[in-house]
Amino acid sequence: MDRKALLKQAKAKAAKYCSSKERAPFQVYEKLMAWELSEDEAQHILAELTEDRFVDERRFCKAFCHDKFAFNHWGKNRIQQELFRFRLSEEVITEGLNYIDPDKYQKTLETLAIKKWSSLMDEPWPKKQKTMAYLIGKGYEIDLVIETVNQVSLSQQ
């Protein structure tokens, strides 16, 4: 098979890969490199896929933020850490995180705090520590966690 046909096949394969779900440009690039294309060829195909709107880092970031918040109930810190793995710019990551509705974010944090608080059988102080550790581990900001857990501990006594 000549190189031109191979590149055409790689582009079609990559387009199919991008059609199944949103992909970050870095994911597509890695996949192209795994198919033993040269760096220039992979960059060229990635540029074509971006131009054809198969790959869009803003769209990927927005979808990732939405899904990880809505389905995994991750906080912004955790989402941001995961997005850095996809080598997106800080501007795009910030834009994606701003897409999360602040009211839903606070409500989800409160719901998680109440659920965790209720599941613990400890005295109030260890309950507070464990609930805070859980929420910080989910990626919520420390100041929001402290405020929310203090409210929950007062309302649950």
Image: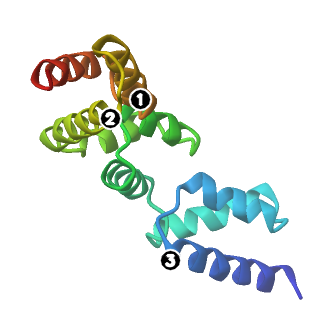
User: Which residue is at the front of the view, 79 or 49?
Assistant: 79
Q: Earlier in the sequence, mark 3 or mark 2?
A: 3
Left of 156 or right of it: where is 55?
right
Which marked residue is nearer to the observer: mark 1 or mark 2? 2
Q: Earlier in the sequence, mark 1 or mark 2?
A: 2
Spatial separation of the CA atoms under disc 3 and disc 2: 38 Å
Foreground: disc 3 or disc 1: 1
Q: Are marks 3 and 1 in contact (CB under 8 Å)?
A: no
For the residue pair 56 and 94, the one nearer the viewer reads as: 94
Name the residue that disc number 2 marks: 116
Pointer 1 and pointer 2: residues touching (CB < 8 Å)?
A: yes
Residue 14 vs residue 23: left or right? right
Helix, strand or loop under label 2: helix
Disc 2 crowd rating (10 Å Cα; few below 14, some 14-19, many 20+) is some
Question: What's the CA distance linking mark 3 and mark 1?
Answer: 36 Å
Q: Is residue 41 visible?
A: no
Q: In the rendering, at what x and y percent does residue 154 appear? A: 12, 18
x 18%, y 35%: residue:
106
Residue at numbered disc 1: 134
Q: Answer yes or no: is residue 87 visible.
A: yes
**Nearer to the camera, 44 or 94:** 94
Numbered label attached to residue 19? 3
